[in-house]
Amino acid sequence: MSNEYIVPEVWTMDSENGGEWASINRPDAGARYDQALPVGSHPLQLYSLGTPNGQKVTIMLEELLADGVTEAEYDAHLIQIGEGEQFSSGFVEVNPNSKIPALVDRSTDTPVNVFESGAILLYLAEKFNRLLPTEPSARTQMMNWLFWLQGSAPYLGGGFGHFYAYAPEKFEYPINRFSMEAKRQLDVLDKQLACHAFIAGDEYSIADIAVWPWYGNLVLGKLYDAAVFLDVERYQHVLRWAKEIAQRPAVQRGRIVNRTWGEDWEILAERHHAADIDEVLNKHP
């Protein structure tokens, strides 16, 4: 008897497809229950989880604060995506796509909702005139790599990460397909970083902040436990860059915000003051 999947004429969702995130996957959008979002005391209100996409924004905010931009003070509220909190009416009002992270800027007369991690990085960079090249050619190169990340990371996360780490069963075809793509992407980055100190050139920018939580964490063994499987040691330029970025104090601070797993010194469910991060990092042995 063949186990080949027969494609139906019209797809319907008859049951959950299994896996760690099955309970939150549905083919429809919109709020599933009524609940307002909490609002803290700072102008910037972030609703997120410490996944790679969430880390992008908290690292960016901590970089701004480290650069003396006091207006970048923020509250980071935890959104437990495994429990479906991204489907509350309050969250959906900020982000109709129900994905973290989502940001509300309350420093303006009318609050500004910003969603999609790349859009949030660009919004903050333009708002505070930081980490964004002003010379047209350099800015274009930075934008190239920012959009490269936004297009490539879903193949690493939703593709490789899902089938390698989260799918209820291991299947050869999707793992091979997305492993090949993950390695191709690492090779793209490695060739770029062989010629440049940072992703978009010789200056640290939001392109690095966007790329590091995905590909930096991957080669440093902090994503999907897949460093050995993907033989990341061959990507020496990516490793050099990843290690250098990891040493930045703002990166060390931002990567633990809205994080609920790991060692005691890297777990901070919510951040409302700088001292919240200090208290956690002080637990580091």
Image (spheres, rainbow, N blue to C red):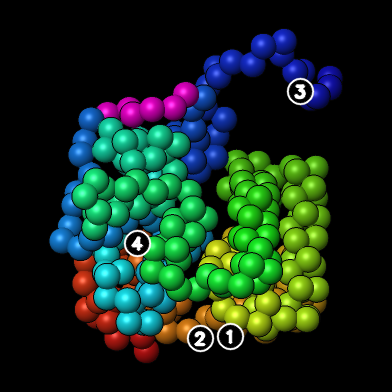
9 and 170: which is toward the camera: 9
The numbered dot on residue 244 is 1
Q: Secondary structure at mark 1?
A: helix
Q: How many marks?
A: 4
Q: Secondary structure at mark 2?
A: loop
The residue under label 4 is: 258
The residue under label 2 is: 247
Residue at the (59%, 15%) spot, across then down:
12
Q: Dots 1 and 2: beta carbons under 8 Å? A: yes
The numbered dot on residue 5 is 3
Q: Badge 3, how many Cα within 10 Å: few under 14, some, many 20+?
A: few
Marks 1/2: CA–CA distance: 5 Å
Residue 56 in the image: state x and y as whole percent.
48, 63
Q: Quick check: 66 above or below 132?
A: below
The answer to whether one can see residue 161 in this image is no
Amino acid marked by disc 2: Gln
| Nearer-N-terminus badge (2/4) | 2
Residue 96 in the image: state x and y as whole percent.
40, 35
Residue at the (38%, 69%) spot, across then down:
128
Q: Badge 4, how many Cα within 10 Å: few under 14, some, many 20+?
A: many
| Nearer-N-terminus badge (3/1) | 3
Marks 3/4: CA–CA distance: 40 Å
Amino acid marked by disc 4: Asn
Q: Nearer the viewer, mark 3 or mark 4?
A: 4
